[in-house]
Amino acid sequence: MVPHSFPAPSEAPGSGLANAKVRQMANISISSGARAARPVRTVTRKRSSVAHDRWAVLVFFLPPALLLFTLFVIMPMGEAAWYSLYKWNGYGTPTEFIGIRNFQVLFRNAAFTQALINNGLIILISIAIQVPLAIWLSTMLAHRIAGVVSFRLIFFLPYVLADVAAGLIWRFIYDGDYGLFAAISNFFGFATPYVLADKDVAIYAVLGVIVWKYFGFHMMLFIAGLQSLDKSVLEAAEIDGATGWQKFRYVTLPLLGSTLRLSIFFAVIGSLQLFDMIMPLTGGGPSNSTQTMVTFLYTYGVMRMQVGLGSAVGVVLFIICVTLAFGYKRIFMRND
Amino acid sequence: MTDMTSTLRMPLQTRVYLYVSLTLIAALVLIPLLTTALGGFKSLGDLRTNPFGLPAEWQWSNYTDILFGERYWLQIFNSLVIAALTVSLTLVVSSMAAFAFAHVRFFGSSFLLNYFLLGLMFPAATAILPLFIRIRDLGLLDTYWGVVLPQVAFGLGMSILLFRNYFRNLPEELFQAAFVDGCGYLRFFWYISLPLSRPIVATVSIISFVGSWNSYILPLIMLNSEAKYPWPLGIMVYRGEYGTEWQLVLAFITLTILPTVIVFFLAQKHIIAGLTAGAVKS
Amino acid sequence: MASVELRHLRKAYGSLEVIHDISLAVEDGQFIALVGPSGCGKSTLLRMIAGLEEISSGDIAIGGAVVNNLTPRERNIAMVFQSYALYPHMTVAQNMGFNLKLSGFPKADMESRVNEAARMLDLTALLDRKPAQLSGGQRQRVAMGRAIVRNPAIFLFDEPLSNLDAKLRVQMRSEIKTLHQKVKTTSIYVTHDQIEAMTLADKIVVLNHGRVEQVGTPLELYKKPANLFVAAFIGSPAMNMLDCTVEGDGAQPAARLGDGSKIAIAPDRKVKVGQAVTIGLRPEHLNPGAGETTLAGKTLLVEPTGAQTHVVFDLAGQSVVAIVDGEHPARYGARFETKVSADHVHVFDRASGLAL
């Protein structure tokens, strides 16, 4: 997630290996002591490449990563684009070409549009609730008060737990018969809400769990951001007469800009791939009210082995991810 | 630190406000976890009337039955094997590739790096069906490798980036000194880069271990036989079997997240640093 | 030990040429300094000799053999870096022995050579420490130890003292000189500090914009700078430069300043009447005691340094520095008078900058 600005390689295609070979041959003639080598005019390169094993690095170090990545990341993605144009059950080769029908089906499907809306909602909540909460907590925990470390630990703990475990735990908490919600409503004497079974409420219950699970991570990002701030700037603000809030509003917050953008970036990318937590909580139900794109893909694509349709979901998700990532980076993160 | 106000200088009001807010949030985090752990000690009836408090009667058998059974240990073992394979393969493959990117200038290097960084943009879920078909065609379905290889592949973007940035920040003159001392690239990698990379090796290991340990969707799709299930799959199956016998499910959840919690508290500094540094540095 | 020869060496990054046709011969056992302002190409040149930088054209010969295509190790050179570039994860002994280890030296041999170098550099007590536990001067010595352990054909130094504080720099300077007198290995030393170059080197090469301005012994450069650049670069405080016009006949030439006053020039300078010249006066040669020409002006600044005092005074509208005895009663605003002998007046053609 870094803008990649490299010095443009000034060499011609393939010249690297060729040079290495020329050099090696030249060396043999020198070490055999027959005659001094003629000056070799070579393409200039910033870093010296006089080491003879340069090619060995390229030949042995890159291919494993390249092979794995191409085989299991890039090719599947390309295949998803291909399969999405077919109706296919995954056996044999896809033959039944149906054009963009899968995509048409997808966007007419109420469950899928609900999934899109839910993903949007998750992003919204992440930005509107989770990030401010994280900033608030991080400024409190930047104080040097007793117990800071323990609080940080506690807040970060949900983040290291598996989504599946968190989902199951909250499934219990929300349970109308056994859980905490049951106990609380019993205590106050009103009817137990079955939050996860109510299609109007379930998604908000899910959102609550998402905030519970992830705010600690964002808080740590902000704590790291705060710790990297130049303290003298804040001292200068204090000398200029800024109150606590003014210091935060006019100095700290603007200086946290890059952390803020990073945090939102992670919230967005994270919410788009939400799956593990939904499955134990609701499995996408009731009546598809808590589907996300990935749970939809799983339920309709994988479970029913509709490779074409599932791949179409993958393509939509891919396009959204890449567009958001590139767009976001271009607009907000170009200076970071 | 935004505010270097020490506890001494802080007015009482502020202190009360701070501690009350922090305690409240901490309670919101901890109560579900404690309820889960305690719930595992209760009987179903007890759970129903009193999900909050201490058990009326401590049902140790809920836990001991799981601990003395084979299932729990098998799942933990599976998770460990998958995570260990993922971490070691990630370390080897990504450190080598990153070294080539950091130190060898070759045609297309920046293009190739960007190619790998594409992996940061989308989750494994987007390509899950073709991935399934690929693993099936390779005959790796229902094997550890069927989970490990895609996990490593999808983690490559991040780990190559972390390693490369770290290698690049090693002083340039170190490279030249080693060169003058007679190192080629291979020896430089082995004698200088790797020994100096312990912090980044730790970071990458933590990120890929935690990712693999908690991973759910890939094993869900690639593994069929319960004997190979890692624990996240296992608890879902367990929950499916025991349905509403929440006290057993809660005990099982508690036991499965226990290793995570213990390791987290033991190595909290490294884990927090690793997981956030991964985010910040890339 | 070996001689080094550079023949028509060039280095270009794309179309940007940073080393223009440099030829140079370094004799066996000589200590040579490459000196010049930052960006003059001295480090690039050194790194080309080391084999860390490719050469665009020309030849480098070490011990008579062309080494253009050899790796640094095959050239059998050792280098001391500005930042020392010690391996942070190795002890002092491991740092010093790393090269020998890579060459497959027997362990006992390696140890004896490391110990010998450590003894020579007074590092014996520090052999088991890591670089982070050493002071700046100690690290510097380890870097040198690493270089001498391998008994190279040549030593290359890339501004090795610039990371040290002033006092340590003087001390290490003399240590380097002592070391060279002991081992007598051919050394090439890059620095931007002309005093370092003067004190250390047998021969100095002054570089500017990738070209050699002058090559010579320290005293040659000081006494007979070939051009304005060398004249201004060598000597501290720097030479005073005054724009003048040549007057008078061949036997008694003189330089006329802006206000009409004249400064006598030695008759052997090849000047023509009416020629626009720049004359150079070294501050230490402006001496109230002796000389043909008297220079006088208002005192602008007095800087006592103890034994000597630097006086800045106004001469025909230009500021001129003179070094006088510490007891001299110069004071701000008063008239200051000094003399210069014609032999000490350097004359340069203003257009070409060359010494006349």
Image: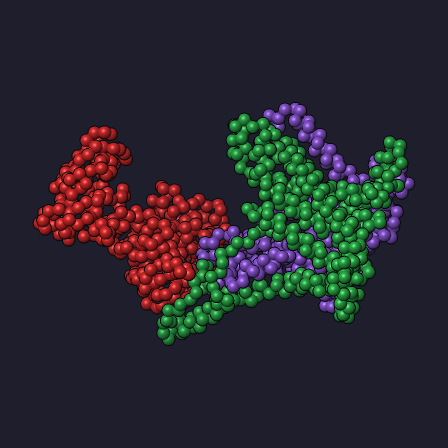
Chain colours: A green, B purple, C red
Q: A133 left or right of C80?
A: right
Q: Nearer the viewer, residue C143 or B232?
A: B232
Residue at the extreme bottom of the image, as rendered? A34
User: How far across and down, in percent of the image, does residue A150 sit?
Assistant: 68, 37
Residue at the extreme top of the image, as rendered? B12
Query: Can see residue B68?
Result: no
User: How far across and down, in percent of the image, does residue C286 sit?
Assistant: 19, 40
User: How far across and down, in percent of the image, does residue A224 sit?
Assistant: 60, 41
For residue B202, above or below residue B58: below
Question: Residue at 74% of width from left, 39% of height from top?
Answer: B29
Q: B141 left or right of C146?
A: right
Please tell me in which quadrant of the rendered image residue A308 appears.
Answer: bottom right
Question: Residue at 33% of width from left, 60% of height from top?
Answer: C20
Question: Residue at 17% of width from left, 50% of height from top?
Answer: C275
Question: Residue at 22% of width from left, 41% of height from top?
Answer: C283
Q: Nearer the viewer, residue C128 or B260?
A: B260
Q: A23 left or right of C222?
A: right
How many marks are shown on the rendered structure?
0
Please tell me in which quadrant of the rendered image residue C307 appears.
Answer: top left
For residue A42, above or below residue A263: below
Query: Can see residue C138?
Result: yes
Residue at the extreme right of the image, as rendered? B45
User: How far across and down, in percent of the image, does residue C301 sit?
Assistant: 26, 33
Please tell me in which quadrant of the rendered image residue A22 appears.
Answer: bottom left
